[in-house]
Amino acid sequence: MPTARCGTVRLVDTRDLMEVLGLTVSSCVEIAVDHLRSSLLTNLGLTANNSLAPLPNYGPHFLLGNFFLSYVLTTTRFQKGSYGVDNNINPRHDLVSPRAEQLVSKGKITQEQLEQLQRIQAAHSNSMEHYTVFAAAVLCAMVAKLDSGMLNKYATLYTAIRAAYFLVYRQNTTRQAAGIRSVLWWAGNIVCIRLFWFAGKALNAHVL
């Protein structure tokens, strides 16, 4: 009988220990997530390290980042290279007739892969075209000396929207996905329009 009681006590102690460990791990995870979120917001210029510190202006950084997103990361060259069909002499010729059909007929790539490459090329072209609008909006905001937090917020939002736009365009094969792509395209436009609007208001704030 004493042995049984002793065993019961040990079982209860083990359960209590597991509960304490579970709470400790949960608290550590929450602290880590809060720290990562705080660090991310600080690194994006959305929050300051302390209430007295001014927010940095990351307009030039977002211009550089979106340049690489639009001109480098969205290109078809990486995927064509992985298929072994990238013709560096005339790379744009790869995805148009008759070269595109020849790649499929010779078994170099499938029809689905060709269509995806063509969508990537279209997204790449749109990204380069749209970058000029974003660059103009950011430059206007900087000239007008808009609040750094506002500029960083809209630039972050634009970057996320354009990245999502590319991914949806790359993968979309249905009308529903194409509709989402169109919504994302307009969302990027709206972000730029708002920056233009706020910049205009700031530039004319002291005009009677």
Image (cartoon, grey):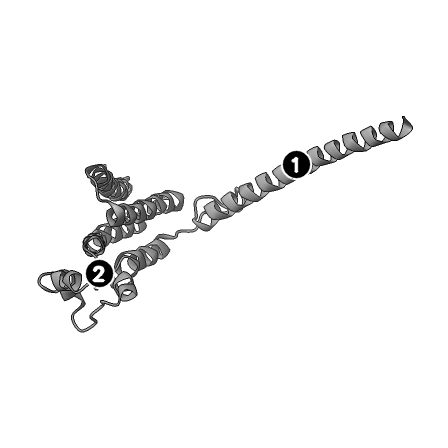
Kindly report the distance in space between the C-alpha atoms of the residues bearing marks 2 and 1. Answer: 51 Å
Q: Residue furthest front?
A: 1
Circle 2 crowding by C-alpha within 10 Å: few under 14, some 14–19, many from 20: some
Could you tell me if residue 196 is visible in this image?
no
Q: Which quadrant is home to the N terminus?
A: top right
SS class, disc 1: helix
Q: Position of residue 54 (x, y in %)?
A: 47, 47
The amino acid on which the numbered mark 1 sits, given as a three-letter code, is: Gly
Q: Residue at x 49, y 45 (%)?
A: 48
Circle 1 crowding by C-alpha within 10 Å: few under 14, some 14–19, many from 20: few
- Work out whether residue 180 or residue 1 is closer to the camera in this orientation and state it: 1
Q: Position of residue 202 (x, y in %)?
A: 29, 42
Position of 189 with respect to 29 (left or right) is left
Q: Position of residue 111 (x, y in %)?
A: 18, 55
Q: Which residue is mark 2?
A: 109
- Work out whether residue 19 or residue 111 is closer to the camera in this orientation and state it: 111
SS class, disc 2: loop
Above or below for 89 versus 180: below
Q: Which residue is mark 1?
A: 22
Q: Residue at x 20, y 70 (%)?
A: 87
- Number of dots carrying numbers: 2
Position of 154 with respect to 90 (left or right) is right
